[in-house]
Image (cartoon, rainbow, N blue to C red):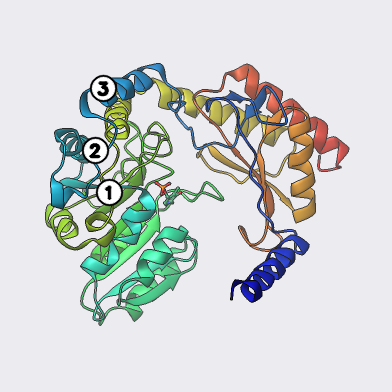
Amino acid sequence: MYKSIKDELQKDLESIKLNGLFKKERVITSKQGSQISTASNHNVLNFCANNYLGLSSNEEIINAGIETLKVYGYGLSSVRFICGTQDIHKRLEEKTAQFLGMEDCILYAAAFDANGGLFEPLLSKEDAVISDELNHASIIDGVRLCKAKRFRYSHNDMTSLEEQLKLASSQRRKLIVTDGSFSMDGTVAQLDKICDLADKYEALVMIDECHSTGFIGKRGRGVHEYHNVMDRVDIITGTYGKALGGASGGFTAARKEIVDILRQHSRPYLFSNSVAPVVVGASLKALEIISESTYLKNKLEKNTAYFRSEMTAAGFDVLPGIHPIVAIMLYDAKLAQKFSEKLLEEGVYVVGFFYPVVPRGKARIRVQLSAAHEIKQIEKAVKCFVKIGKKLKVV
Ligand SMILES: *Cc1c(COP(=O)(O)O)cnc(C)c1O
């Protein structure tokens, strides 16, 4: 039987390659950091990790992980509601809720699961989800699993959101859903305006803060802090797998009854293993570090501002904004690919994005700044961008 399927799959793979869409993985042979080694290049400056606060290889966090491993063991080998939960899991939920200014929090194996298990327990066919068209894949999948009526608004467009809210007005519960920060453009959602519209049309607001938690807003609480609406958001999903140490694990922080219902009905929570204790212990340390001081967040902001202004001054077409995700627009897919290859040869690791990850004709290089970067490293990156940019006649 497999033979015919094998042939079909091989054809599919061929066509992915022919279309230039085959995804290869670079092999990293060192710890995560501002400087890494890969199987083909030693000492590459890394500008493409979600290691926003430089915590992925933080000494205190590693030690907290080792300590937790010794005290709490390697694994729980069980779903929480069946065999029980460890006290550190409860503590991480409490600390996460506190950090975000939410009433309660529930852990998942990943933010992908948090989004996958959010909508179905809360919404049924008489309800509505009003979703930004560029929301993350895990939100799209999560929404697919619920029976609510779906409404899509143009990306970050408040007029379009209002139109969709009007169309949804006869539905029972209405939930506006958006990424807090969008990973391709570094756009920060206009959450104050979204909350105003939510009030006007009696909708709830949910944000996915995977690219915000820990470094957006005055104390790094996220987009709800940045836009001064900390008490007006109903549901926040997020990850421990990016700024907060970068291992894995996700969460939904929300109003108490929402979290209570998720604990009863959310399938990725009910039918999947507890987060590994070592990850929980290390994530607690990450939260402690960023609660005590905004030093890392401030350094990230300085790095971001410096890179954005240097690149703009050098003549690059930089999507404006404040986010450490910086899109350098090249528009042409082949050029974006070539540009990133040349940069790697110079020792600067960034990624070119093109269709279908971003719209056709909107190819770019995405740079991600980190608090782990030193100004010298950013200077070098800019220099390399200018060198290659001149060679390829971009600047
Ligand atoms: C990375 C990301 C996720 C998935 O997070 P994981 O914890 O790695 O599963 C979900 N939503 C958004 C917006 C993300 O950027």
> Mark 2 is on which residue type?
Thr
State the quadrant of the N terminus.
Answer: bottom right
> Mark 1 is on which residue type?
Asn
| Residue 292, x across and y down, in percent | 28, 21
Between 202 and 68, the one nearer to me in the picture: 68
How far apart are the two marked residues, 3 and 2, measured between alpha carbons?
23 Å
Q: What residue would you read off at disc 2?
A: 96
> Mark 3 is on which residue type?
Lys
Above or below for 90 versus 73: below
Q: Which class describes the residues within 10 Å of circle 2: few (<14), some (14-19), or many (20+)?
A: many
Could you tell whether 74 is left or right of 381 in the image? left
Question: Which mark is in front, 2 or 1?
Answer: 1
Q: What residue would you read off at disc 3?
A: 70
Give the quarter of the image for residue 338: top right
Q: How many marks?
A: 3
Looking at mark 1, is its residue's CB closer than 8 Å to ligand 1?
Answer: no
Q: Earlier in the sequence, mark 2 or mark 1?
A: 2
Give the quarter of the image for residue 355: bottom right
Could you tell whether 129 is left or right of 354 in the image? left
Q: What residue would you read off at disc 1?
A: 273
Q: Is residue 332 visible?
A: no
| Residue 314, x across and y down, in percent | 74, 33
Q: Earlier in the sequence, mark 3 or mark 2?
A: 3
Residue drawn at the location 65% of the way across and 69% of the way down:
6
Q: Callout 1: helix, strand or loop?
A: loop
Q: Earlier in the sequence, mark 3 or mark 1?
A: 3
Q: Which class describes the residues within 10 Å of circle 3: few (<14), some (14-19), or many (20+)?
A: few
Residue drawn at the location 28% of the way across and 53% of the way down:
272
How far apart are the two marked residues, 3 and 1, measured between alpha carbons?
20 Å
Above or below for 39 versus 262: above
